[in-house]
Amino acid sequence: MEEQQAKFGFTQFAENWNGRLAMIGFVAGLITEYVTGKGILSQLGLM
């Protein structure tokens, strides 16, 4: 009998993509902060 892999939850594939997208988001936040001269919280109006 073949073993089926889970399509939902904490799979290696999902975790790899989650990490990659988190890194892209972090770098985008740093670039936005550098270009505007404001922190992310001040851009959102929270500070």
Image: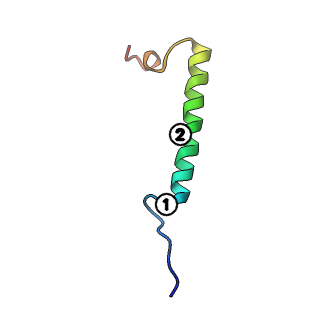
Residue at position x 48%, y 66% in the image: 7
- Tell me the SS state at disc 1: loop
Snapshot colouring: rainbow
Task: Where is residue 8? Give x, y as percent.
Answer: 44, 62
Inspect the image, locate mark 2, and give the three-letter code of the amino acid beneath it.
Ala
Residue at the top extreme, as displayed: 37
46 or 16, which is in the foreground?
16
Tell me which label, 2 or 1, sits earlier in the chain: 1
Task: Where is residue 12? Give x, y as percent.
Answer: 53, 58
Q: Which residue is mark 1?
A: 11
**Left or right: where does residue 6 sit relative to residue 31?**
left
Task: Where is residue 4? Give x, y as percent.
Answer: 50, 76
Whether the residues at callouts 2 and 1 have beta carbons within 8 Å, the answer is no
Checking the image for residue 35, the label placed there is none
**Left or right: where does residue 34 sit relative to residue 46?**
right
Residue 44, by quadrant, is: top left
Q: Which residue is mark 2?
A: 22
5 lies above or below 32: below
Inspect the image, locate mark 1, and give the three-letter code of the amino acid beneath it.
Thr
Q: CA distance from mark 2 to mark 1?
A: 16 Å
Task: Where is residue 19? Give x, y as percent.
Answer: 54, 45
Residue at the bottom extreme, as displayed: 1
